[in-house]
Image: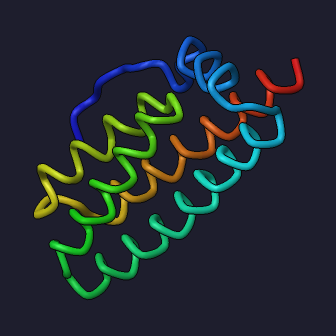
């Protein structure tokens, strides 16, 4: 996968979302739903890879790209876009890189929320 660098977390987008939702709880619920969905989609992409179902990988990459963009996970969205376009070249290391980026987002998000 080619290297490209976007911020792990778009703080401007996070602040937009915070003001958009009527309460901190609604914002937190949305972020929790994103993180849970991302974990599920990654697991489904891994299963699809094991059976060489490239269209399933593309579908999950597309969905995760959209939700990543929505919550400000720019680098994660870029990874998903790349996977979507190059599904035929997706391998275990690609999925692992996506998992690493998701973990970076989780860590950065937790730091921003607590800090």
- Between residues 91 and 103, which one lies in front from this camera angle? 103
Percent x, y for residue 31?
66, 44
- Between residues 31 and 1, which one lies in front from this camera angle? 31
Q: What is the quadrant of residue 89 in the picture?
A: bottom left
Percent x, y for residue 17?
61, 26
Image check: 115 left or right of 43? right
In the depicted structure, whether residue 29 falls above or below residue 95: above
Image check: 13 left or right of 20? left
User: Residue at left 55%, top 45%?
Assistant: 102
Percent x, y for residue 63?
34, 56
Instruction: Name the quarter where the N terminus is drawn.
Output: top left
- How many discs mark residues in the rendered view? 0
Percent x, y for residue 52?
20, 81
- Between residues 31 and 79, which one lies in front from this camera angle? 31
User: Residue at left 43%, top 48%?
Assistant: 97
User: Residue at left 62%, top 25%?
Assistant: 20
* Residue that protrudes farthest toward the bottom in the picture: 51
User: Residue at left 58%, top 18%?
Assistant: 16
Image check: 93 left or right of 96? left
Instruction: Name the quarter where the C terminus is drawn.
Output: top right
* Residue that protrudes farthest toward the top in the picture: 12
Q: What is the quadrant of residue 106 in the picture?
A: top right
């Amino acid at each position: 996968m080619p290297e490209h660098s976007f911020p792990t977390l778009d703080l401007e987008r996070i602040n937009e979302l915070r003001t958009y939702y009527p309460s901190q709880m609604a914002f937190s619920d949305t972020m929790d739903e994103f993180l849970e969905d991302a974990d599920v989609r990654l697991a489904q992409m891994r299963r699809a890879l094991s059976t060489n179902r490239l269209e399933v990988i593309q579908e999950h990459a597309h969905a995760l790209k959209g939700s990543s963009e929505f919550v400000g996970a720019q680098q994660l969205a870029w990874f998903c876009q790349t996977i979507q376009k190059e599904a035929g070249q997706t391998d275990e290391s690609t999925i692992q890189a996506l998992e690493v980026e998701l973990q970076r987002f989780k860590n950065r998000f937790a730091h921003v929320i607590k800090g």
